[in-house]
């Protein structure tokens, strides 16, 4: 097993990471194009091209030199989350910086590092053998971090160019750096804003304090009503559609080693918290959540703001419908809106249901074998991820394809947070595992 | 009574308003100096000078040509609130714009317009008579909007230069444009942040949702616990020190015409809201408040933030001590902090107790007479303001001087909000009233 990362691949990753392709921010439109161009250039040998969509462009490429062999679609994304507060970064988010075995930059682990693993795997096969062991189509999109809103129409339009047997995703993190794993399920996602409006304009809190309902207070009351003291979602109907965990799933879950105290220390909280009656791992992997990602109202001066807002996301499990969740939350908000303000839900685009590969799928078996070959002595685990892969749901619905999640990202790499990084050693390990996987799938 | 504003005074006010002297923002340090220089230049005839303090400089000036006559200190401030969201302004906050009888700009009514009234009053006396009817010292500070933190030490240091019989304040708005009034009391103020910290770093809300207490949720629970459903502050001890309203005060209050429905429509809320058992006017003028001015945590993406914050201000009434209020709120926060997060109070500097001139003070009588002369047929009202004048408390404590609030700002002029304005007709009315007041005080 190679442990020294290829300097060519690292140099490429550095270039890729230096492009601030933040999809949620329209001022980065040119950067989206630059990132797509960079990916297409790496795939020039496979007719790599930037194809317009209704939103950010998509990179397509294909090598189909094995008639009769399996055909896979390799999926990944070139867009990244916003950097957040740059003051919290030890090195600037778009100046990739190597410290020890880690390269730090926004997007390093989600998803540019894992995309480079896939690109490098293909490049080496071609360099060394003149071709690939199976037919590969590439689909690298630029809207994953905003819920892939343009992907459905794109897949419909390019269905013929994407004919295949399976999708292999470079997105969707591995559980832990020390324990190789294959993710066989991902939660769904629906995002919305809760907007509370009070007076016609911002008011001076000295002049008007005590006379009107403050939208900040009203927002806090509504948000506080969403969960009970122990962390269960207290919105009536929220859990109604959750499919009970099968005995087989529960048994598989029970086999996963999970040290709650070590997890608590890792995330740095004084105590874990959440729905009673479920272990922390069950809550992370099998229970739906409702999280307030943002609270925003007024400013640090003497104001009663006109409006206060919360941004919320709900992670869904199999059985739950995004629209049904929004409906029950909206009804709850109506019941908990105090007098003197109005409240409304603004649905964000891109909701997706949960996704599961299905236990015993041959692709999962191949992935486990490939990992065994790269990490001899470790028995790969079949795990789930709490994050969402909208693309996997779309591939199933539109292309009729299951998706194997085979990322070499790991969940401790500060995904969506300051100081995001990717382990450079995982680059070579990833290339080795992807190479073996392709041979097995062929 | 003159009703056409002086174009010279308006031109001056425009210059003054164009200086973005935002005291809360350290990037405006040069602007603070420019605004102070502008005021000092207007007072060159009275030895106007910019004097250093521990913070933003103070403008001092004096004309003492009437030995034996009354000496007053004219107080005002050249600093302004931040503009807030500039998108909500119809014209840019620091490009003064006249529409009809109104000049729009940040600081127009708080406090640059009223300061220009005082400057113009003095200038005209000097132009027309060669002097003033009484001795006047000017003290125009630059930290009112941040709680005047440097003023106490400044007053101690310059006590001799400020020897006087009374302070007349150009700050502290008149109640309504249609009803002349003298404000005889102002609430106190204490400001603090509530900081809730959870995980060691921002977490991905998919990866970690359901396992940890979200600081946004915890902040909302704490904020929601501060008030009951009807709007009373539910912090034990919060009302303990409130002095009951005297019969005389209650009777004076009952004489004030106040149409709750018209007020409701003015502020644009669907219903008024607040402490039961008190009229809206009682709540505004005589009851302490606890307002959350800002909620801030996370961002509009899939994050569980490391930290969530609220900025709070409490308006105090006579009898209440700022430090006691912070203590009871801090104790309440401890009791209402859910497991899995920590919460703390960060006190802001500049707390001040409430201030009252005292019923029947000769300065209040003179003010009422001066207003009668400018608004014949209207009987001036003795009112209170919900806002805070830290300087008045300091003048009493350090200089032993009572303060007469005699501003020509009115409370409907979008103080601290977008589209702040000052009525130009009030400029001439203000000069006429100040002139008469000075003659009466002499």
Image: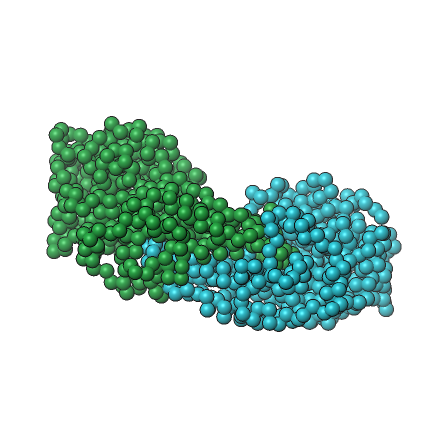
Chain colours: A green, B cyan
The percent coordinates of residue B354 (x first, y second) are 66, 67
**Residue A244 visible to an observer of this rendering:** yes
Residue A210 lies in what quarter of the image?
bottom right
The percent coordinates of residue B66 (x first, y second) are 85, 64
Say which quadrant the C terminus of chain A sits in: top left
Residue B279 lies in what quarter of the image?
bottom right
Describe residue A100's horizontal placement relative to residue A363 as left or right.
right
The percent coordinates of residue B237 (x first, y second) are 56, 71
Closest to the observer, B152 or B216:
B216
Residue at 22% x, 43% y is A357
Residue at 70% x, 41% y is B98
**Residue A16 visible to an observer of this rendering:** no
Describe residue A242's horizontal placement relative to residue B386 as left or right.
left
The percent coordinates of residue B123 (x first, y second) are 80, 53
**In the depicted structure, whether residue B384 falls above or below residue A5:** below
Closest to the observer, B304 or A105:
B304
Residue at 36% x, 43% y is A322
Describe residue A340's horizontal placement relative to residue A162 as left or right.
right
Residue at 20% x, 33% y is A164
The count of marks equals 0
């Amino acid at each position: 097993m190679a442990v020294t990362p290829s300097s060519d691949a690292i140099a490429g990753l550095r270039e890729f990471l230096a492009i601030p392709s933040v999809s949620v921010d329209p001022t980065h439109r040119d950067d989206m194009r630059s990132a797509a161009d960079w990916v297409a250039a790496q795939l020039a040998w496979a007719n790599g091209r930037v194809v317009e969509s209704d939103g950010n462009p998509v990179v397509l490429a294909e090598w189909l030199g094995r008639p009769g062999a399996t055909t896979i679609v390799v999926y990944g994304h070139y867009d990244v989350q916003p950097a957040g507060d740059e003051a919290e970064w030890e090195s600037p988010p778009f100046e990739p910086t190597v410290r020890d075995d880690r390269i730090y930059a926004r997007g390093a682990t989600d998803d540019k590092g894992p995309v480079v693993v896939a690109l490098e795997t293909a490049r080496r096969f071609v360099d060394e053998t003149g071709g690939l062991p199976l037919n590969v189509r590439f689909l690298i999109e630029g809207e994953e971090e905003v819920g892939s809103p343009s992907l459905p129409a794109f897949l419909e339009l390019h269905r013929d160019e994407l004919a295949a047997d399976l999708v292999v995703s470079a997105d969707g993190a591995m559980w832990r750096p020390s324990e190789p794993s294959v993710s066989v399920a991902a939660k769904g996602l629906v995002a919305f804003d809760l907007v509370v409006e009070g007076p016609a304009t911002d008011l001076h809190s000295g002049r008007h304090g005590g006379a009107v309902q403050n939208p900040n207070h009203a927002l806090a009351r509504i948000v506080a009503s969403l969960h009970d003291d122990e962390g269960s979602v207290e919105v009536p109907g929220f859990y109604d559609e959750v499919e009970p965990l099968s005995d087989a799933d529960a048994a598989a879950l029970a086999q996963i080693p999970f040290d709650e105290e070590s997890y608590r220390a890792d995330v740095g909280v004084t105590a874990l918290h959440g729905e009673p009656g479920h272990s922390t791992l069950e809550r992370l992997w099998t229970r739906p959540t409702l999280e307030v990602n943002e609270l925003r109202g007024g400013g640090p001066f003497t104001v009663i703001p006109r409006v206060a807002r919360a941004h919320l996301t709900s992670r869904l499990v199999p059985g739950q419908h995004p629209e049904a969740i929004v409906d029950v939350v909206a009804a709850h908000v109506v019941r908990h809106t105090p007098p003197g303000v109005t409240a409304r839900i603004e649905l964000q685009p891109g909701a997706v249901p949960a996704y599961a590969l299905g236990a015993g799928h041959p692709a999962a078996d191949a992935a486990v074998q490939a990992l065994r070959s790269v990490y001899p002595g470790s028995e790969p685990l079949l795990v789930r991820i709490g994050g969402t892969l909208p693309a996997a749901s779309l591939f199933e619905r539109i292309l009729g394809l299951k998706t194997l999640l085979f990322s070499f990202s790991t969940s401790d790499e500060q995904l969506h947070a300051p100081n995001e990084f990717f382990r450079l050693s995982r680059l070579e390990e990833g290339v080795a595992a992807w190479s073996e996987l392709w041979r097995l799938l062929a």
